[in-house]
Image (cartoon, coloured by chain):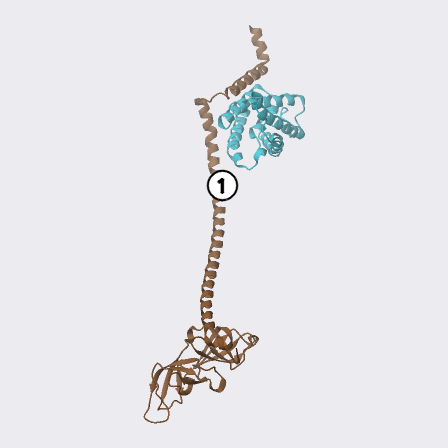
Chain colours: A cyan, B brown
């Protein structure tokens, strides 16, 4: 319960920063998705129903606050959570390279989902221009910001040192 | 029944996940429909995020605004200084133009002066004025390089100024008519009687050696006589201002004002006496 509250707090802070501070940074497509880092961490750490509910809730809040496509963030957060959770059960997640690869792979996956969902719903529409440069920039941004944030989440994890928590 | 419940309970994560995904997907598909006003819970959630977000945004915007204003002011200040500098330069340029125009008019007047048609002349600008006791002189911006030498007469369209006393490479000194050491042979315009005009040292001329019998009145014009070959003949020297005819002696006491206002001289002509055109 304590952990849930802690990650709820982190989620709230990340969403607030996402819609305020990070909107100001002149990073363009390289602007990282802070909630994505939390989803990634929770996918590895809380591969449980509680984690899924938390992720869905945070995605829903982000939808309420910022999304022009209501429901997209909730759905993507949930899909990413299950994806990460599934992978982390099959690969030893206790190493830094895993985190870096996971960040890169899932940030590409996230942006592909972001860009392709509307296209899948409306197949006649053309794919947005600059898709691949956006992919590259977002991946770089996520890697640069993601590793320190994941490390921060790990350091503040109340269950640090326990068997289930990856050692970074 | 209990078996079904146990089955679901054992796979609660799977079923929970499916329900959540279905819910998310329904939200997503409903998201394409026209938005309805959020419910009370959604409003609370929105407020919980948007208020601190707004505070951060306003703070950042304020800071960015201060930064923008600061840089804008720095730019405006620099632009203001540049414009002021431009204005000063334009003022100086305008002043220069006016001066050049006035100088042009004066030079045209000088060149129309009959002497310029009779003798070779060199126009020169007055670049200095010296007054030491009763001794008056001017400094001109022409010297040896322009062919000037001591003794050459200097005049304007108004009349005689004096003669050159010293010559440098690029400048020369002119002893004025009113200097104590100056003496000019004159002839009265009306009576053609002759005398010598000497500087008194106080800005006036004393006409000497004028016979007591000569008829001279206030306002008569004194011209250069051309004697001794120093000054060209017929240049105005001065206008009689005071005549004192005594009952004794050979000469009258006569004072004259110079024709030229030396205090306003800017350009003069140096006359080459021995080189008539």
Vertical comparison of B111 with B255: above or below: above
Query: Which of A51 and B160 lies nearest the eye of the viewer?
Result: B160
Is B123 placed left or right of B220 in the picture?
right
- Asked if residue B186 can be seen in this view, the reply is yes
Q: Nearer the viewer, residue B197 or B57?
A: B197
Say which of A18 and B157 sits in front: B157
Rate crowding at label 1 as few (under 14), some (14 to 19) or many (20 or more) other CA atoms within 10 Å.
few
Residue A161 versus residue B11 in the image, above or below: below
Q: Chain of mark 1?
A: B
Q: Which quadrant of the view contains residue B24?
A: top right
Dot 1: element: helix
Q: Residue at x 42, y 85 (%)?
A: B186
Looking at the picture, tell me which residue is in the foreground, A161 or B138: B138
Q: Residue at image x 48%, y 87%?
A: B228
Residue A63 position, x and y percent, is 51, 25
**Which image quadrant is residue A28 in?**
top right
**Number of numbered callouts drawn:** 1
Query: Could you tell me which quadrant the N terminus of chain B lies in?
Result: top right
Instruction: Answer whether residue A54 is visible to the viewer in this image.
Output: no
Disc 1 designates what residue? B64
Q: Position of residue B230 (x, y in %)?
A: 49, 84
- Point out the residue furthest to the top here: B1
Residue drawn 47% across and 43% down? B66
Left or right of residue A102, residue A20 in this image: left
Instruction: Give the x, y percent position of residue B227.
Output: 47, 86
Where residue A35 sits: x, y (%)? 56, 28
Taking the view exactly as shown, the residue that stands out farthest to the left is B247
Q: Quadrant of residue A111?
A: top right
């Amino acid at each position: 319960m304590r952990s849930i509250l802690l990650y709820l707090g982190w989620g709230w802070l990340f969403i607030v920063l996402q819609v305020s501070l990070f909107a100001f940074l002149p990073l363009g497509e390289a602007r990282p998705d802070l909630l994505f880092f939390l989803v990634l961490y929770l996918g590895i750490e809380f591969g449980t129903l509680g984690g899924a509910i938390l992720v869905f809730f945070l995605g829903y809040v982000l939808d309420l606050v910022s999304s022009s496509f209501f429901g997209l963030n909730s759905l993507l957060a949930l899909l990413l959570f299950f994806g990460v959770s599934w992978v982390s059960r099959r690969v030893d997640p206790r190493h830094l390279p895993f985190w870096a690869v996971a960040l890169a792979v899932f940030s590409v996956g996230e942006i592909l989902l972001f860009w392709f969902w509307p296209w899948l719903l409306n197949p006649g529409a053309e794919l947005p221009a600059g898709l691949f440069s956006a992919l590259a920039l977002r991946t770089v941004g996520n890697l640069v910001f993601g590793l320190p944030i994941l490390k921060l989440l790990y350091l503040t994890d109340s269950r640090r040192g326990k068997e289930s928590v990856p050692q970074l | 029944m209990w078996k079904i419940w146990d089955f679901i309970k054992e796979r609660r994560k799977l079923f929970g996940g499916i329900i959540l995904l279905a819910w998310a997907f329904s939200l997503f598909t409903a998201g394409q429909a026209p938005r309805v006003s959020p419910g009370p819970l959604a409003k609370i959630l929105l407020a919980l995020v948007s208020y601190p977000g707004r505070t951060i945004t306003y703070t950042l915007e304020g800071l960015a605004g201060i930064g923008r204003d600061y840089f804008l002011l720095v730019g405006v200040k620099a632009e203001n200084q540049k414009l002021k500098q431009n204005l000063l330069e334009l003022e100086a340029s305008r002043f220069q133009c006016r001066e050049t125009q006035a100088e042009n008019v004066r030079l045209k007047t000088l060149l129309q002066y009959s002497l310029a048609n009779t003798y070779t002349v060199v126009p020169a600008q007055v670049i200095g004025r010296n007054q030491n006791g009763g001794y008056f002189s001017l400094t001109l911006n022409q010297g040896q390089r322009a062919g000037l030498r001591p003794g050459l007469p200097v005049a304007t369209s108004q009349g005689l100024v004096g003669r050159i006393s010293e010559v440098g490479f690029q400048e020369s000194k002119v002893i004025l008519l009113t200097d104590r050491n100056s003496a000019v042979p004159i002839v009265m315009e009306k009576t053609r009687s002759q005398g010598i005009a000497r500087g008194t040292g106080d800005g006036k001329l004393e006409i000497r050696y004028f016979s007591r019998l000569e008829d001279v009145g206030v306002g008569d014009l004194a011209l250069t006589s051309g004697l001794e070959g120093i000054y060209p003949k017929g240049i105005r020297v001065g206008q009689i201002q005071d005549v004192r005819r005594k009952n004794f002696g050979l000469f009258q006491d006569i004072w004259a004002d110079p024709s030229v206002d030396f205090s306003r001289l800017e350009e003069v002509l140096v006359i080459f006496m021995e080189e008539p055109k």
